[in-house]
Amino acid sequence: MSVELRPYTDADLPLTVALEASSVVKRDLGGVLDAGEAERIHRERLERMDNGELFYTIHTEDGPDAIGIVAVFRTPFEGEDVNEIGIMILPGRTGRGGRGLGMEALRQLTERARAELGPTRLHGFTSVDNAVINLIGARLGWTNIGQTDLDYEGRPMRCNHWILDLTP
């Protein structure tokens, strides 16, 4: 199944609300958020795009609606801002059965980051308990440099720290 990334827009608020309210999606991301918190995140994404950060919705040929969001955004980590990559896909649309939608979306985003951000290092922080996303990182050629503790929207999270170096 093919994957298409489209720029995130103001019309994607319902997708953000659905993702942030999903206990499945948010299981490894500190828990669900209410509609008001999701709207705040939506507005922040739009503002961050104005500052050069990359936010895209994920589409397939299954229908017109987006199935998730993939992004590269600046995150403070150990005293500096790093380019972090992230993905969220609606439950039931994750690519089970070998479809690999998330892996393809991340692969495409990596290529866009290479083109739009230039030489940089991408950081991925994945819950140590999320075997699928950790496997995707390894399959895409990322390097796991160890574990770290992060704060995700005010909630603690134990993560694997992945790096992909996009510098020549």
Image (tube, rainbow, N blue to C red):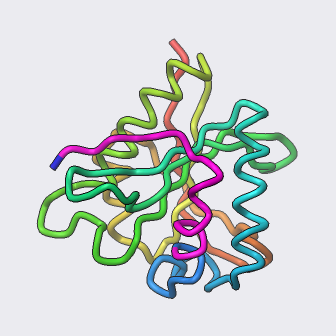
**Residue 136 picture location, percent across and down:** 33, 54
Q: Residue sitting at 40 percent across and 71 percent down?
A: 90
Q: Residue sitting at 52 percent across and 66 percent down?
A: 15
Q: Residue sitting at 79 percent across and 40 percent down?
A: 81
**Residue 19 picture location, percent across and down:** 52, 73
Q: Residue sitting at 65 percent across and 52 percent down?
A: 10
**Residue 75 picture location, percent across and down:** 75, 48
Note whether 53 is above or below 97 in the view shown: above
**Residue 1 picture location, percent across and down:** 15, 50
- The quadrant holding residue 43 is bottom right
Q: Nearer the viewer, residue 113 or 138?
A: 113
Residue 6 painted magenta: yes
Give the farthest residue toward the top.
Answer: 168
Q: Nearer the viewer, residue 146 or 97?
A: 97
Q: Nearer the viewer, residue 89 or 152?
A: 89
First to last magenta residue range: 2-18
Residue 15 painted magenta: yes
- The quadrant holding residue 101 is bottom left
Note whether 114 is above or below 62 in the view shown: above
